[in-house]
Image (tube, rainbow, N blue to C red):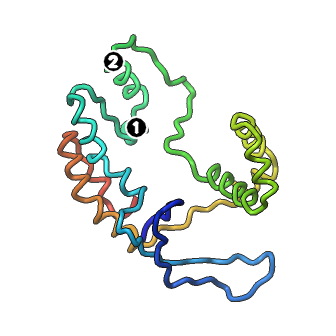
Amino acid sequence: MGTILAGSPESPDLTDMQAGPATGDQTADYTFSVNYTDLDNHPPVYVNVSLYMSQIHRYLRFFKRDAFHFLLLEDLQEAPVQVLQGVQSFLGLDIQNLVGKDAELRANVGGAGHYLWFEMMSVIEAHPILLNVKRLIPESIRKLMFSGLKRSPIGQRVMDSYQLPPMKKETRQRLLDVFQKPNEELASFLSRDLSIWFLGEL
């Protein structure tokens, strides 16, 4: 199981392909599932980039430990003012309050906006003419158009329909097994308690 990467030299082995219900009209909701095996035996890219100590070790080959300032998302969520002041202090900057009095902290937000983007791209890529037009439009203009789509009634309806499917228990357990030792190493390196990362229910 893993992530299919475009341009991979070998295609994965697809098995257990299922779709349901077997029949329906244009308003029916369908569920599709497939298992695949990565033929080159490489870990999925999203697993690789989440093995933080592997990334840190690469940098430690060139820089000393005191050249780094490590932050956790949990710290930013719980104490944004103190965390940002710590960053400023580490960089040798004058300490300023970078968090507005009535600021709303929206940490690690993606979800519905990404869903709208992929839905839009799936429509464009299904039509060669639209795909060619897209290539002619500068990226800055495309971003403005997408921002307008997000604010439009159609964009709002698409984003409102977004629901993140629950992770399967076996998938969660497999990920916990993969990250157990690397995250224990990270906890030791940072001298931090990261036990919450090992919980089965997040």
Instruction: Say which residue label 1 marks.
Output: 78
User: Residue 111 has which mark?
Assistant: none
Q: Is residue 156 above or below residue 87?
A: below
Towards the viewer: 5 or 105:
5
* Residue shown at 31% from the left, 47% from the top: 52
Residue that lies at the very extreme toward the top in this rendered image: 94
Q: Residue at x 35, y 18 (%)?
A: 91
The crowding category of the residue bearing disc 1, from other C-alpha atoms within 10 Å (few below 14, some 14 to 19, many at least 20), is few
Say whether marks 1 and 2 touch (CB < 8 Å): no
Picture disc at residue 89 = 2
Q: Which of labels 1 and 2 is toward the front? A: 2
Relative image position of residue 27 (x, y in whole percent):
79, 75
Q: How far across and how far down the image is residue 140, in percent?
A: 70, 34
Instruction: Characterize the local packing of mark 2: few (<14), some (14-19) or many (20 or more) Cα atoms within 10 angstroms.
Output: few
73 left or right of 11?
left
> Residue 83's x, y, as percent?
37, 28
**Which element carries disc 2, helix, strand or loop?**
helix
Q: CA distance from mark 1 to mark 2?
A: 19 Å
Above or below, 32 relative to 166: below
Q: Secondary structure at mark 1?
A: helix
Left or right: 188, with 123 as reference point: left
Q: Quadrant of the C terminus?
A: bottom left
